[in-house]
Image (cartoon, coloured by chain):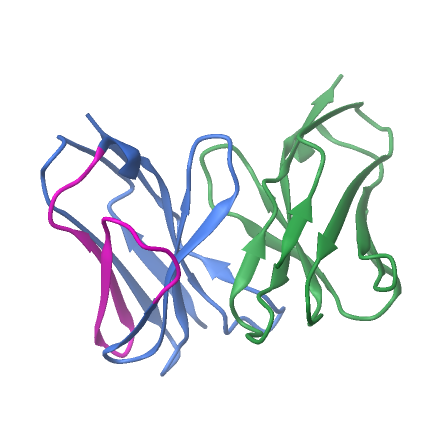
Amino acid sequence: GQNIDQPTEMTATEGAIVQINCTYQTSGFNGLFWYQQHAGEAPTFLSYNVLDGLEEKGRFSSFLSRSKGYSYLLLKELQMKDSASYLCAVPFSGGYNKLIFGAGTRLAVHP
Amino acid sequence: SQTIHQWPATLVQPVGSPLSLECTVEGTSNPNLYWYRQAAGRGLQLLFYSVGIGQISSEVPQNLSASRPQDRQFILSSKKLLLSDSGFYLCAWDGSTSGGYTFGSGTRLTVV
């Protein structure tokens, strides 16, 4: 079957760096997505990794290790507006477009 | 540019009442469309997806149904709501150039 695990909650200080981990199990791999979801709002796309390594996009970076079934989202120079849930998602096996989401990691950034 | 619209934004419905949530996409044709539900404090659960008019696939057995009457319209319905149907309903389209989904703004449904 398919399964995604993420920590439920994390806290961090403004200006700091935080790493949000995601482990997944899937019978066929077609990439891994990260989404940001502010409270009461729809998720918005952050990143997509299909190859191993680190993809950097401004203050946010995403890492993937396919052999370990592991990804992380790295947020640098944290700002208060980064307080949100971060969702890890992978496509259902056999179907590129259907995504299975982790329960999300709720990040609270404190001054 | 492509946009996805979803309404209403919030809804409070009594148990046993019907439900109809609508999602439309603009600026593209023959989109793949999805309905997800997010229960309080939980992850997104795929309910239905559609690859074209009249083509609906259900991912989990439930009290809900979906229809695709037009190319860019996707409707989520129920004949009789249950308390357990409460949640945040999201329509999504998978055609964004950045990859993954573009979500509608969501409907917060509370069944009382």
Q: Position of residue A78 (x, y in %)?
A: 79, 33
Toward the front, the furthest residue is A1
Image: B63 above or below A100: above
Write the start and end of the magenta stretch as one range: B58-82
The residue located at (57%, 66%) in the rendering is A92
| Chain represented in blue | B
Residue at 36% of width from left, 82% of height from top?
A: B30
| Residue found at x 40% / y 55% | B104
Left or right of B27, for residue A39: right
Percent across and percent down for residue B103 are: 45, 56
Which corner quadrant holds the C terminus of chain A?
top right
Q: Is residue B61 magenta?
A: yes
Q: Is residue A96 shown above or below B9? A: below
Comparing B1 with A86, the one in front is: A86
> According to the rendering, which colour does chain A have?
green
Note whether residue A58 is visible: no
Residue A61 locus on image (x, y percent): 82, 52
